[in-house]
Amino acid sequence: MALVDMVMPKMGESIMECTVISWLKQPGDRIEADDSILEVATDKVDTEVPASHGGILKEILVKDGDVVAVGSPIARIEIEKDELEPSAGPEPPVAEKPAEETVEQDVASVAAKLEGEITQLSNRNPNPSVPSESVGNNRFYSPLVLSIAREEGITHDELLAIPGTGVEHRLTKKDILNYVEERKKKPAAAEKPASTGPVASPVAKAVSLNGHQDIIQMDRMRKMIAERMVESKRIAPHVTSFIETDMTVIAQWREKNKKNFQQQYGENITFTPLLIEAAVKAIREFPMINISVEEDRIIVKKSINVGMAVALPSGNLIVPVIHNADQYNLVGLTKKVNDLTRRARENKLTADDLANGTYTISNIGTFGNLMGTPIIMQPQVAILAFGAIEKKPAVIETPQGDLIGIRQKMFISHSYDHRVVDGSLGGMFLKRVSDHLEQFDPERNPV
């Protein structure tokens, strides 16, 4: 037998440290390579960490809440000597004997910063009895816990009633497996919680001091969202410009082609990839929109990495990034949009999916909003918000004279950092995005 140190694996290109949320395995447990053994939070996403080796978990070196640098030892696993080479994952250093020194963990700051509205995600679930990632009362469930819940047919209300032993009362694998065992011993009629009153959740519980108002403690995610939004407003003097765009041709083209598009490419085409395509074209023409600021230096980004704000039923937002968005045709953009949206709602995004955005769009029209003043995602310098598309009477210019007709119109909002983007650049860029949408070819092929 031999002992190996398992180290904190790399979570993404820009991730240097992770906060331990909870351990899913305990010392003495037998584990297989790639088994999820702990949950961690980064400034990008929450995720489960797989074991680097199979064997016996002998020692846990970090506690819940510790901030651990990537590459630092987090556990010791006892393995067979002929299995010293890891079967998957990172390449941890191998130690025949346990280290004598105590590993000192950096616990300086647990306030990991949000890369724009991170992950307590909810799944759009066709079966209402099956819980989603983040359900009522802001309670978060890991993909592993959800997988077990779905397999066992555990309902939303049942999950809320299960006491969690993890940090902030989160459910661990052990908690839900214990519940499953107890559940099997009970008669079928007792499987559902009694309907005599609402089930209280241990997370984000409202407290009333005087009967006239409730107090709800912010969870970790909401604190990070608040911090990031305040930081952006402090750093960048925001200016917002607006334009109204005629979307009639695009709306008609999409309605005409969406059925064939789905049949040919296996994807549903929404307005989002069409909006991203127009923004990318404009960024190519105005590269000084695709920049960031470091002290008194302007960094011009060669890659066009477009973040798209995805709204989740939990009330949170997340901003996955389409890297090198200018390298995709419309079919490719549609597949990327649908894939990132689906994985966001299934809590399957990686840290790299959220990293290195250079420009962001938000489709606030999905909420029925006409226009808004979005907050810039730092360290970017601008963000677009697309409003709802509405039918309106409009003046139509023709060679025979002006006519009044029904057109499908949309407002676009462009917020930009006035330190480096003047009104002329911000306004011209916005107008160019509008031009690309209005000049859409009604006969175009998606490819």
Image: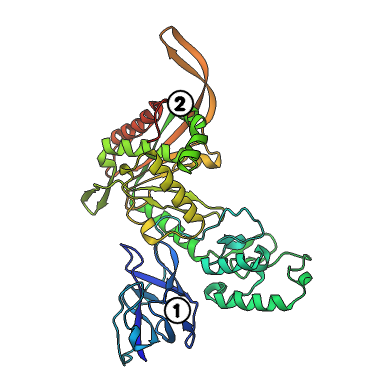
Q: Which residue is mark 1?
A: 32
Residue 132 location in percent, x, y?
58, 60
The image quarter containing residue 367 is: top right
Residue at the location (44% across, 81% down)? 63
Q: Along the horizontal axis of the image, is 94 left or right of 229? A: left
Quarter holding the N terminus? Answer: bottom left
Residue 20 sits above or below residue 273 on the image: below
- Judging from the image, the colouring scheme is rainbow
**Residue 186's mark?**
none
| Contact flag, marks 1 and 2 (Cβ < 8 Å) | no
Residue at the location (53% across, 39% down)? 369
Residue 248 location in percent, x, y?
48, 26
Q: Nearer the viewer, residue 431 or 6?
A: 6
Residue 176 sits above or below residue 352 on the image: below
Q: Along the horizontal axis of the image, is 368 left or right of 348? A: right
Residue 440 sits above or below residue 106 on the image: above
Q: Which residue is mark 2?
A: 249
Residue 232 location in percent, x, y?
37, 52
Secondary structure under the numbered disc 1 in the rendered image: loop
Residue at the location (73% across, 68% down)? 193
